[in-house]
Image: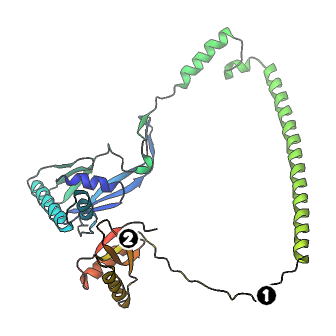
Amino acid sequence: MQLENYISDLLYRYECVIVPEFGAFLTQRVSAKINTSTNTFYPPKKAISFNEQIQQNDGLLAHYIADVEKIPFEIALEKIKKCVGSIKSQLVEKETISLENIGSLTLNEEGKVTFEPFNHLNYLTDAFGLNQMVSPAISRIEYKREIESIEKVIPLAITPERRKSRPYLRYAAVAVLALGISSFIGSKYYVNKVESHNQIAQESANTQLEHKIQEATFVIENPLPAVKLIVTKPVGSYHIVAGAFRVEENCDRIVSNLKAEGFNARKIGVNKYGLHQVIYDSYESREKAYEALNEIRKNGNPDAWMLVKNLD
């Protein structure tokens, strides 16, 4: 199994892809930049890093492999475990592991995994189609020389040096500037007059409308009592899944039990296998979701896992 292919697919959509018992590949958005020495323009992208400390399984990678290969979740976990064992053995043998489109992994003298990302693939979908570009340097001196050669044939004062030798052009420029200023003042005065007229007309219309509203009489018989509806909408894209059930009555019973225990439990629909899914709660941040997942696993449900999905 080419594990790097599945990791690469998930890096387009998620900021963190955890390989259980090995580490996590993280992405961070980097703004566009320019290398002034080489005149190279680089589009925005996702920078990839590796954190060996994050190893706890969140179910994301295993569920994705299970969906793609149409295999049970447990078998997908076994495949991941086998690949991780092979990678660790090669690292111990001082080999360099090259993960296609992601980066290379090596083991340093301290026994820590070091990661060197590959930069030829951009995982930022907002920058799709944008490639780095090299722009040739602009030589302004050459352009100036070309203009001076034209001035020798056509008597036009273009360069500053030629302007100094033609003082009458200075007075023509002053005249043009004065004409432009007067035109600007005139147009400004006209605009102010139009705005003043519009404001007066608007105030008059508002006064008439207010007068008519005050003269109107509204009679409401048997007014209905005000009804206040309080709707609580779960927020967050990180959901802790309690389980999935074939029979919906069992699903409702689990929801009732979890609510009795204090969880904000609810059903989130039927997955593609026809199972009704129940979640403990939803969270806005990955950190809070991980804290809740660890607490739930410690206190009774080791099979709980996290689903990252927008349910709106």
Query: Is residue 110 something one can see in this rendering?
Result: no
Residue 24 lies, in percent from the top left, at: 26, 62
Q: How many marks?
A: 2
Residue at coordinates 29% horizontally, 81% vertically from top-left? 296
Of 218 and 41, nearer the camera is 218
- Which residue is under mark 2? 238
Of 45 and 137, nearer the camera is 45
- Which residue is under mark 1? 221
Of 117 and 283, nearer the camera is 283
Q: Determine whether 279 is above or below 173 in the image.
A: below
Q: Determine whether 61 is above or below 291 in the image.
A: above
Which three-letter amino acid code belongs to the residue tagged 2? Tyr
Residue 223 lies, in percent from the top left, at: 74, 87
> Where is residue 255, by image quadrant?
bottom left
Secondary structure of the residue carrying numbered label 1: loop
Residue 54 lies, in percent from the top left, at: 26, 67
Question: Residue lying furthest bottom in this view?
Answer: 260
Residue at coordinates 85% horizontally, 28% vertically from top-left? 175
Query: Is residue 251 something one can see in this rendering?
Result: yes
Q: Sequence-wise, which precedes: disc 2 or disc 1?
A: 1
Foreground: disc 2 or disc 1? 1
Secondary structure of the residue carrying numbered label 2: strand
Which three-letter amino acid code belongs to the residue tagged 1? Glu
